[in-house]
Image (tube, helix red, strand yellow):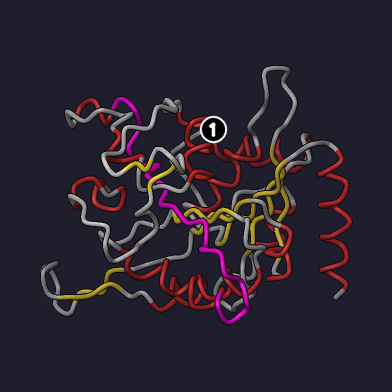
Amino acid sequence: EEEANRLQAIVRDQRTLGREIVVVMGVGFVGAAMAAVVADAEDENGEPTKFVIGMQRPSTRSYWKIPLLNRGMAPVKSEDEELEPMIARCVNEKKTLIATFSYEVLKLADVVVSDVQCDYLKDSFGNVRDGQADMVALETSLEIVAEHIPPETLVLIETTVAPGTTEQVAYPIMRKVFRKRGIQSDPLLAHSFERARKNEFEQMGLDYADENLRFRLSDTAKQVLVSHAGIDQDDNCPDLEKSKGKCNKLKGRPDHQHDPVASPDTLL
């Protein structure tokens, strides 16, 4: 309760500054970098636009990341020379990044970014065909997120996952929890294809602003991508229902037939 009260006070102050509250679930080698990059974001006047809270469960394996990050130290080593200075700057100078162990922080989030591990377990050495993805940690974290977040919170899955995970695994889990909570709206859920930069899309012969990538995202997710990834706002979804202004077959509904190549999951 003491930690929850501390977080509420911090978030209240940050909201008065007009900053969005972003919670990054998991501050390992991917989550720490994501937290730092978002916390370092600024507007055209050089003012921070986001306040980031890294959430790490206090397990025996990972609890040490929390005090380390709160001191402005990177919890992981990286070849990226900018990462450690960026974390130090955001924590100690800009004051836009902290870490916590409390799931209560999810109740305060405008956006949640999931960076929980999803490891591939091989049954035999040197044979990647013989194995399976360990989804337990990811599925558990999605349940926890859905149990705590406000219904209008956007959830981005940044974890590298198998094709179709967002639509066929994450969405049903979160929707089921929402219904148990009495929330009738669908969860705002999208996949972060952060590993494909604009020049990498071009190298693969893909259009970075391909409407097939965009039409399956929720309107809120589109707005995030428009403001942070430079994707234009024109909506050319072939299933677009003009009268409603949005695709009427979004978010994992079984009648949504689509080319699997168009899925952000598949592009990873």
Q: Residue 16, located in which quarter of the rendered image?
A: top right
Q: Amino acid at mark 1?
A: Glu
Identify the residue shown where x is 38% and y is 54%.
250
Q: Is the magenta region chiefly helix, strand or loop?
A: loop
Q: Which residue is denoted by mark 1 in the rendering?
A: 82
Q: Position of residue 184 (x, y in %)?
A: 57, 70
CA neighbours of label 1 inside 10 A, class few (<14), some (14 to 19), many (20+): few
| Residue 102 left/right relative to 172 | right
Tell me: 62 left or right of 202: right
Residue located 66% across and 51% down the image: 110
Which residues, given as a range, are shown in magenta? 179-199
Q: Give how far across and how far down residue 120 sits, in percent.
A: 27, 69
What x and y, as percent, mark residue 130?
A: 12, 75
Q: Is residue 212 above or below residue 68?
A: above
Q: How many marks?
A: 1
Could you say which is closer to the camera, residue 116 or residue 239? 239
Q: Is residue 69 magenta?
A: no
Quadrant into which the N terminus falls:
bottom right
Q: Residue at x 19, y 52 (%)?
A: 260
Q: Residue 169 appears in which quarter of the rendering?
A: bottom left
User: Is 81 on the left or on the right of 107, as rendered?
Assistant: left
Quick check: 148 above or below 220?
below
Residue at the image point whose x is 31% and y is 38% from the top: 237
